[in-house]
Structure formats: C-alpha cells, structure tokens
Image: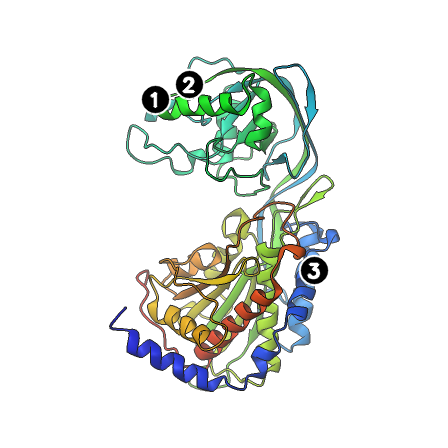
C-alpha cells in the first residue's frame, strides 16, 4: 500500500479537480433519495419478496424510472432479466408458549418471534425438547438427537453453528442452516422447530425474518420459527439462566446435552410454497460515447428484494436495501441528466434474491447484459443509509479502486473509514469470484435493524445517504471516463 500511495494521491487530486463543479452529484439529494426509499417501503409492496406482486410492483417502479431517464433496456424482456427462485408466502403464523408455571403467553410476531422464510405449514402443539444445536451428524461425531425421543414434540435448537470444530476437523459447513436442521428434526419425528440465538452472546440477536435457509428439499410439513432468547427462557423453570446453562453444558463438553423442558409450545403456520417462482433483475444501460471504450462497461448494482411479509406484519427493508436501490436510481439519474457523457458503458442493475443467496447477482454474472470479459469494475450499494460514516469493502483485494474512492471522499465529505475487507461480499461476491474488481459501498454502523420489522425509513440518515451516493457517483465517473483502467483481481 505504501508503494501505491503516490499513485493514489494523483488519482484523487485529478478526480477532485474534475469535480469542483458537478451537477451530477448535485442532483443527488436527500429529498430524492428518501422519496424512492418510501415508495419502495410502501406497505402494498409487502416487503419486496421476489415472486410476489409486491416485488413485481417494485420492479415496475424502477423500470419506469429507467425509461424516463432514456436508458436502454438491458433485460431479456424489456427491463426485466428473468429468472426463477424459491418462494414461500407466509399467510399466517402464531406462536404461544406455556411456561413451567403453566401460564400461556402468546408471542408478538415481529418482535418476540418470526417464522423462518422457508418454514413449512402445520400446527405443532406439544412439549418442548432442547436439542442443543439441532445437528444430527453421527458420521461426523456429533448427534444432538442421540438417545432422544422427539416424536410429536417441538424441538428447540441453538441457531448458530457450534464454536468448536467437529471431530473430523472439516467445519460445520451448511449443516447449521435452518433447512438442514429442519430436515434433521423431521427425520426424528419432531412436529415443529424453534431456533434461538446463543443466549450468552454479548449482543443478543433479535428474532429476524430471514429467507437464507440452506440448500436441499423444502421441508414443507414442519413449521419453523425463531424466537428471542428472552422469550425462549419461558420454557425453562430457571428462566434465562437455566437456558444459558443448558447451552454452556453443550459448549463445555463439545458434546450433546439434550433434554426435555418443562414448557410447551403451540406453533401454527400457513404458508404456500413454489419451487420455481418467476421473478427478475431490473437492468438499464447507458451506452458509452467513446468508440474505443464503449465496449467496456461498469456495472452499478444493488439488490431490490427484501424478506417480505408474514401475516399482517411487513418487513419494509428501508436500509436493506431500499436505500441501495434508491441509490442506483439516483446514480442513473446523475449520469443521464448531469451532463456527463460516459466514455465507457454503464450498466445499472437492481438484483433479485440477494437475501436468499445472491440469486440475481449470480444469474447476471452467468447472463451479462454486456460481454463479461469487458467489465472493468462493479460497484455494489447495500445498506447505505443508517449510521454516521461510510465503509468501502474490497480494498484488501483492489487497493487502487479503494484508494480512488477514499481520495474522492477526502476531497469532499470526509465520511469514510479506513476499515475494508478483501474480496466482494453480498452481490459483489459473484463478480469478484469471476475476477471483476469490486467496491462495496455501505454505511456504518448499518445493521441495527437488519431483517427486523423496525427497518423503516424513519431510522435512516438522509444526509449520510446523500453523501455516500455522491461518493459512489464520483467514483463511477472516474471509471466510466477511463481514468481508472482496472487492476488484476486474484480471482481472474
């Protein structure tokens, strides 16, 4: 990095001089960004779950914006780059716990508990059995179900993976994800699965609505939810201290310590599953003006999807990632109306299915709107409006690109931190894996409301949002105008 310092200074100085008068950056305003965020968080969009009418409406909103700016459509069906993915619409879900004292307590959806995104349907009303981490891997030396009879019972499992290595030293892989745990529970005859965060975590995780479930066949007959550690403690006679003790016993022995609890649970879920629901990325293209550079392109992207709704509760996803989608729309406008004629082509993409496992970004990498080998860089905007500062990921792998953005920030808002990481992350990851230099824009601290119903527009910092998007624009202009020529990615 020391050897690169003089070059980074020259890049930043030249970029700063080029942007003393910048109508494109000036077009990016708090009012414009927040108007788009609020539109994408509207209750009728239902949390923008891909495959639903709400997500389709969000796609139309963004496609109309691209059309109004005069962009070229980059999909295989107008603005839409079609793909399919799993869809599970949760129409209703309820969870009531009966504590050791015999008192029934209905839990509040969205705060005390949330269904897992690919929960099955059904009603489980039964005693609860603690099953450690919910892993059944006897061939690898660990089986939380060994010696247990959980037939017809509701099982309670710690959600994350154990902190120790399995006996074979190969790590836990995806076995700790909800779908493998649900399969293990069903295979042992359980009627329902409850997941709980580690009760002794420094910052106890809230009950989140996540659609990252793991691979394999859908476990459609087993209702699955996660609840807070405070709520799960109702199932133990000794409350949270006893629950923490149960987990500590497993961790200390690095072996199962499962047992039946004095409480019981009633979990009822009504969900409709589709293994291949149609959905799409939204793609707009601003062609380059330079005969020598227009075949090269910059991709600017962010995911449009969130985790949807459950019953009457909507997870609006304001920061994650209406803020990033609004940023992509603002960047398209800044290029189209700001007086900059990019020499390279700029491709704007709003990805589907990031929450489910980067589905839309992986699809785009396999079906690029412009030849992939001529892609110079990818800028990703994800969770860009909550907090008080800016972080730029990818600097550990792409120091020139990272240094360019840091230098531009130093010449303007001075809000970025030195923290970075190697590689891509989120929707930038598939690009990084294929050797494309990436830069990941995010705000920090950004995840206070991650995958919670409280991720609303009111929690955002519009000024930070604006400055971050202006920084992304200034960085994008340098790339689009050919002043950044690219660098070798280790993945290439």
Residue under the image location 46 percent in, 38 percent down:
202
User: In x, y percent, where is residue 355?
Assistant: 54, 49
User: In x, y percent, where is residue 51?
Assistant: 64, 50
Q: Is residue 23 visible?
A: yes
At mark 3, the secondary structure is helix
Give the spatial CA distance, label 3 vs label 2: 48 Å
Which residue is identified by label 2? 257
- The N terminus, quarter of image: bottom left
Q: Nearer the viewer, residue 398 or 223?
A: 398
Q: Are marks 2 and 1 in contact (CB under 8 Å)?
A: yes
- The C terminus, quarter of image: bottom left
Along the horizontal axis of the image, is 190 left or right of 161? right
At mark 1, the secondary structure is helix
User: In x, y percent, where is residue 271?
Assistant: 67, 35
Q: Quick one: label 1, few (<14), some, or many (20+) residues within 10 Å?
A: few
Give the spatial CA distance, label 1 vs label 3: 50 Å
325 w.r.t. 184: above or below? below
Which residue is identified by label 1? 253
Which residue is identified by label 3? 38
User: In x, y percent, where is residue 429?
Assistant: 43, 57
Q: Are marks 1 and 3 in contact (CB under 8 Å)?
A: no
Q: Are marks 3 and 2 in contact (CB under 8 Å)?
A: no
51 w.r.t. 79: above or below? above
Which one is earlier in the sequence, the residue at label 1 or at label 3?
Answer: 3
Render colour scheme: rainbow
């Amino acid at each position: 990095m020391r050897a690169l310092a003089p070059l980074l200074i020259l890049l930043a100085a030249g970029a700063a001089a080029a942007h003393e008068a910048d109508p494109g950056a000036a077009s990016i305003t708090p009012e414009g960004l927040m108007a788009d965020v609020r539109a994408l968080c509207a209750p009728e969009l239902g949390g923008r779950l891909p495959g639903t009418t709400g997500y389709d409406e969000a796609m139309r909103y963004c496609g109309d914006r691209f059309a109004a700016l005069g962009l070229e459509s980059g999909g295989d069906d107008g603005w839409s780059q079609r793909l399919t993915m799993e869809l599970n619409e949760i129409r209703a879900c309820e969870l009531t716990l009966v504590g050791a004292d015999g008192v029934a307590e209905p839990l509040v959806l969205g705060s005390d508990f949330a269904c897992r995104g690919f929960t099955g349907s059904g009603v489980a009303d039964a005693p609860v059995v603690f099953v450690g981490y919910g892993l059944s891997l006897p061939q690898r030396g660990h089986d939380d179900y060994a010696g247990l009879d959980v037939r017809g019972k509701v099982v309670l499992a710690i959600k994350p993976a154990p902190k120790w290595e399995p006996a074979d030293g190969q790590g836990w892989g995806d076995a700790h994800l909800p779908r493998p745990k649900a399969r293990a529970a069903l295979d042992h005859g359980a009627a329902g699965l409850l997941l709980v965060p580690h009760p002794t975590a420094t910052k106890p995780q809230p009950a989140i609505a996540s659609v990252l479930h793991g691979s394999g066949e859908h476990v459609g007959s087993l209702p699955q939810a996660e609840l807070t550690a405070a709520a799960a403690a109702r199932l133990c006679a000794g409350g949270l201290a006893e629950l923490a003790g149960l987990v500590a016993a497993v961790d200390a022995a690095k072996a199962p310590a499962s047992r039946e609890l004095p409480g019981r649970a009633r979990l009822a879920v009504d969900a409709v599953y589709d293994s291949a629901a149609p959905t799409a990325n939204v793609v707009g293209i601003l062609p380059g003006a330079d005969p020598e550079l227009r075949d090269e392109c910059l991709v600017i992207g962010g995911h449009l999807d969130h985790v949807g709704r459950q019953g009457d509760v909507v997870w609006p996803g304001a920061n994650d990632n209406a803020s990033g989608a609004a940023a992509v729309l603002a960047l398209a406008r800044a290029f189209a109306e700001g007086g900059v004629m990019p020499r390279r082509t700029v491709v704007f993409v709003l990805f589907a299915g990031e929450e489910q496992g980067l589905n839309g970004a992986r699809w785009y990498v396999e079906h690029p709107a412009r030849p992939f080998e001529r892609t110079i860089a990818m800028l990703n905007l994800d969770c860009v409006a909550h907090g008080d500062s800016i972080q730029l990921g990818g600097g550990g792998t792409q120091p020139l690109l990272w240094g360019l953005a840091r230098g531009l920030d130093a010449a303007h808002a001075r809000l970025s931190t030195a923290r970075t990481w190697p590689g891509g992350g989120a929707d930038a990851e598939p690009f990084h894996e294929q050797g494309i230099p990436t830069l990941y824009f995010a705000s920090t601290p950004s995840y206070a409301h991650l995958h919670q119903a409280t991720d609303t527009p009111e929690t955002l910092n519009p000024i930070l949002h604006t400055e971050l998007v202006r920084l992304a624009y200034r960085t994008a202009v340098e790339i689009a105008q050919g002043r950044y020529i690219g660098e070798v990615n280790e993945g290439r």
